[in-house]
Image (cartoon, rainbow, N blue to C red):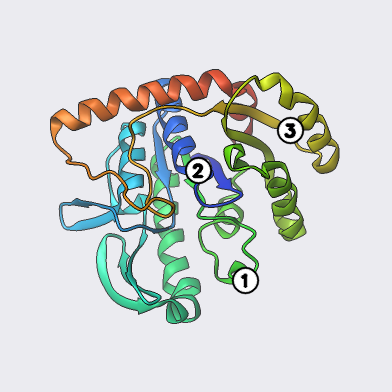
Amino acid sequence: MTASTLMIQGTSSGAGKTTLVTALCRILSDEGYKVAPFKSQNMSSYSYVGEKFEISRAQAIQAIAARTEITPMINPILLKPLGNYNSHVFVKGISYGKMHAQDYYKKFALYKGLTESKNSLDHLLQTNDIVILEGAGSPAEINLQQYDIANMKMAEYCKAPVILVTDIDKGGSFASIVGTLTLLEKRHQKFIKGFVINKFRGDVTILYPSYSVLKKKTGKPVFGTIPLIDFDIPDEDSLHSNPKQISWSTKYLNVLDKEINHLSKIVEKNLDMKKIRGLLH
């Protein structure tokens, strides 16, 4: 068995990739699929500590949303920032040591990092119906593109269709979409199948003319617009100075499960899930 795949990438950090993957994991799990999240490389100060392993907290929460086991396979590379361009590197949940960013990119990312990521993804593809991949930052960071093992290298490896999500609350979201596509290599542009507009306030109908312009410029559709949602699921810390601390108690997990259900229902209502399901192969 080889699982169907879908990848969520973003026009920037904080665009809503993690949230959208969390919601899709729950939506598809509710439909009876065996689903797993996957993020090859995650930089975060906040982690989930399991039995003899440590991975990103975000992927652990996504596994809870998917109702699947929390394992190192879903986040094979974790970078915990230490300051001064140094990070504590974890490989498949095990401490690998401290590494400077320059060494990480030039000596690790495209070698052990990419190999371990592909091996972990292969395992998930063989043991699930659907794997929802999450990118990191933006796939169009041209200064780091050659070392990027979290975005298009993963999409290309498993031939995953990509949905690009953007945060409209920040402004400049349509320019970010077009700019991201323009900066991608031609062979990678074809992986992007459409867009999701995230964190919108107001009447969505005022955006419809913009969607037509976007379709003409890119040839790709908008799969939906997600409103700015009030929910209590911990954020990643890349854009937040004080992310929520949590305890993995049974009481908290019950609260978290309800919040994931709340999120998934709103996301499902505002996305064209028929078209998204059609991307799965």
> Which of marks 3 and 1 precedes in the sequence?
1
Q: Please indicate whether residue 212 sits to the left or right of residue 120 in the image.
A: right
Q: Where is residue 47 in the image (x, y as percent from the top left)?
A: 27, 53
Marks 2 and 3, how far apart in space?
Answer: 18 Å
> Which of marks 1 and 2 precedes in the sequence?
2
Q: Mark 1 points at which residue?
A: 143
Q: Please indicate whether residue 194 sits to the left or right of residue 126 in the image.
A: right
Instruction: Examine the rendered structure and indicate whether residue 28 appears above or below residue 122.
Output: above
Type of amino acid under label 1: Asn
Viewer-proximal residue, 34 or 216?
A: 216
Q: How many labels does the image show?
A: 3
Q: Residues within 10 Å of mark 1 (few under 14, many from 20)?
A: few
Q: Residues within 10 Å of mark 2 (few under 14, many from 20)?
A: many
- What residue sits 33% from the left and 31% below the top? 232
Marks 1 and 3, how far apart in space?
Answer: 28 Å
Q: Mark 2 points at which residue?
A: 17
Q: Name the residue under label 3.
A: 221
Q: Callout 2: helix, strand or loop?
A: helix
Q: Where is residue 125 in the image (x, y as percent from the top left)?
A: 45, 45
- What residue sits 58% from the left and 60% below the top? 153
Instruction: Examine the rendered structure and indicate whether residue 217 appears above or below residue 43.
Output: above
- What residue sits 47% from the left and 31% below the top? 24
Q: Where is residue 189 in the image (x, y as percent from the top left)?
A: 73, 52
